[in-house]
């Protein structure tokens, strides 16, 4: 039994939620998000609350809490939005936003260009990249793609990391 699935999701004022044709749509002041939902989980929208309950299939119990979390994330995204902050560490490492692309100079012989997905905005200040958006999944995936360009290495800690991420450092070679 899902603990998250049992708790009804409260719909704040200014947010519209509809469930038609297997697609859950959430409209709010910041954005409109849509996500396909299987019929294994029963979704009822009544009295300013969304109630989820599992069906009879074996997959239903597995999807129940997941769909509840997705619904909460969609409502938070259209009202407040999400933010991911990445830090760049290393001598000569830098980033810049050029149009709809983010250009990373992180120790390669060439700059690495990544296209910023629709619905996500990027801002670079010194050695921090701030990514904001309404869709938590898309934002997290793009942040992971940016970090994947140059993961932090364990000897000097150079690379791109999430804010607050701790990198275990290795000792390195010893002089004899």
Image: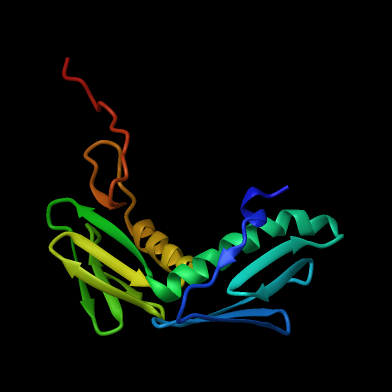
The quadrant holding residue 67 is bottom right
Query: How far across and how far down the image is residue 134, in percent?
Result: 42, 74
Q: Is residue 110 visible?
A: no
The quadrant holding residue 122 is bottom left
Q: Who is closer to the viewer here, 110 or 6?
A: 6
Task: Specify the quadrant that holds the C terminus.
Answer: top left
Query: How far across and how far down the image is residue 10, in percent?
Result: 55, 67
Query: How far across and how far down the image is residue 18, in percent?
Result: 63, 82
Compared across the picture, whether 74 is left or right of 50 comes to left
Query: How far across and how far down the image is residue 61, in percent?
Result: 76, 54
Q: Is residue 107 visible?
A: yes
Q: Residue furthest front?
A: 47
Q: Who is closer to the viewer here, 160 or 165?
A: 165
Compared across the picture, whether 1 is left or right of 91 comes to right
Q: Who is closer to the viewer here, 88 or 70?
A: 70
The residue depicted at 22 percent of the width and 76 percent of the height is 97
The residue depicted at 31 percent of the width and 39 percent of the height is 167
**Depicted 26 relative to depicted 176: above or below:** below
**Depicted 43 relative to depicted 84: above or below:** below
User: How many marks are shown on the rendered structure?
Assistant: 0
Q: Residue furthest right?
A: 56
The residue depicted at 22 percent of the width and 57 percent of the height is 107
Q: Residue furthest top?
A: 176
């Amino acid at each position: 039994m899902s603990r998250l699935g049992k708790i009804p999701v409260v719909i704040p004022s200014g947010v519209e939620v509809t469930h038609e044709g297997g697609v859950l749509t959430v409209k709010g002041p910041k954005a409109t998000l849509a996500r396909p939902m299987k019929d294994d989980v029963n979704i009822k929208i009544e009295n300013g609350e969304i109630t989820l309950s599992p069906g009879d299939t074996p997959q239903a119990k597995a999807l129940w809490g997941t769909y509840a979390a997705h619904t909460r994330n969609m409502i938070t995204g259209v009202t407040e939005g999400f933010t991911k902050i990445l830090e760049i560490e290393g001598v000569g490492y830098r980033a810049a936003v050029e149009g709809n692309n983010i250009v990373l100079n992180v120790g390669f012989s060439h700059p690495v260009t990544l296209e910023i997905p629709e619905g996500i905005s990027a801002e670079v200040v010194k050695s921090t990249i701030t990514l904001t958006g309404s869709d938590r999944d898309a934002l997290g995936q793009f942040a992971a793609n940016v970090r994947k360009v140059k993961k932090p290495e364990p000897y000097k800690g150079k690379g791109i990391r999430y804010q607050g991420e701790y990198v275990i450092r290795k000792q390195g070679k010893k002089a004899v």
